[in-house]
C-alpha cells in the first residue's frame, strides 16, 4: 500500500552542515546518518536515491535549491511525485516568507517562523496547506517592533 505521508525534512547547506531537521512521523533515519550515504553518490545526484545501508532501506528524495539541499526520507512506499511536489512547494513557501534567495542565515535567524510553517504545511506527515495566502493567516511573522525590542533584550 502506498503512503502519502512525509516522515521528515532535512535541510543541508552548501558546506554539508545540517541546518534543519524536522521529523513529522515515525522514526526515520537521522540526517546525520543519511547525509554521508547521500553524499557517497556521485554528483549530479538523482532526485530519488535508494539507500540500502539503513534499516529498513530508505528512499531518499532530494532537491537542490539556492545552494541548499532538501532531503525527505521514506521508509515506506510513497508516490515520488507527491514528495517532490511537496519539496518544490516548500521552497516556494519559504522564499515567500523569508525572501529570495533562500539562505542559511535567513532560515536560522527566522527559525520560529520556519517551525510554524513546517507545522502548518504538514500535520503529522500529511500535507495540509501549502498556499502562501492561507499560511499568512495562521503564521505569526515578527514585525519591525518585535525585532527592535528583541534586539535590546525586551519582548514585544
Image (cartoon, helix red, strand yellow):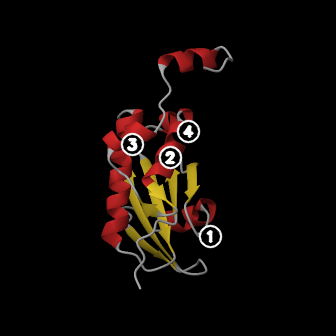
For this rendering, which residue is in front, 107 or 97? Answer: 97
Quick check: can you spot residue 105?
yes
Residue displayed at 51% across by 38% down: 113
Name the residue carrying label 1.
27
Which mark sits nearer the N-terminus, 1 or 2? 2
Q: Which residue is mark 2?
A: 13
Q: Is residue 22 left or right of residue 48?
A: right
The structure residue drawn at horizontal position 50% and vertical position 26%, both measured from the top left corner, is: 142
Q: Which residue is mark 3?
A: 135
Seen in the picture, residue 18 relative to 132 is either above or below; the reply is below
| Circle 4/circle 2 CB separation < 8 Å | no
Q: Which residue matches tag 4?
A: 111
Q: Position of residue 119 (x, y in %)?
A: 51, 51
Q: CA distance from mark 3 to mark 1?
A: 27 Å
Distance (Cα) linking label 1 and label 4 = 22 Å
> Residue placed at 62% from the left, 60% from the top?
32
Badges 1 and 2: C-beta atoms under 8 Å apart? no
**Circle nearer the N terminus (3, 1):** 1
Mark 1 or 4, nearer chain start: 1
Q: Secondary structure at mark 3?
A: helix
Amino acid at each position: 500500500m502506498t503512503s502519502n505521508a512525509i516522515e521528515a525534512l532535512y535541510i543541508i547547506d552548501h558546506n554539508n552542515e545540517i541546518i534543519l531537521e524536522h521529523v513529522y512521523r515515525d522514526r526515520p533515519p537521522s540526517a546525520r546518518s543519511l547525509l554521508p550515504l547521500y553524499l557517497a553518490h556521485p554528483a549530479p545526484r538523482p532526485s530519488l536515491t535508494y539507500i540500502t545501508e539503513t534499516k529498513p532501506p530508505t528512499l531518499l528524495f532530494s532537491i537542490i535549491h539556492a545552494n541548499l539541499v532538501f532531503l525527505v526520507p521514506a521508509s515506506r512506499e510513497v508516490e515520488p511525485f507527491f514528495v517532490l511536489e511537496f519539496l518544490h512547494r516548500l521552497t516556494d513557501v519559504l522564499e515567500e516568507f523569508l525572501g529570495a534567495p533562500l539562505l542559511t542565515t535567513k532560515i536560522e535567524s527566522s527559525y520560529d517562523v520556519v517551525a510554524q510553517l513546517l507545522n502548518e504545511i504538514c500535520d503529522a506527515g500529511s500535507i495540509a496547506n501549502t498556499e502562501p495566502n492561507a499560511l499568512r493567516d495562521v503564521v505569526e511573522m515578527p514585525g519591525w517592533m518585535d525585532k527592535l525590542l528583541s534586539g535590546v533584550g525586551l519582548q514585544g
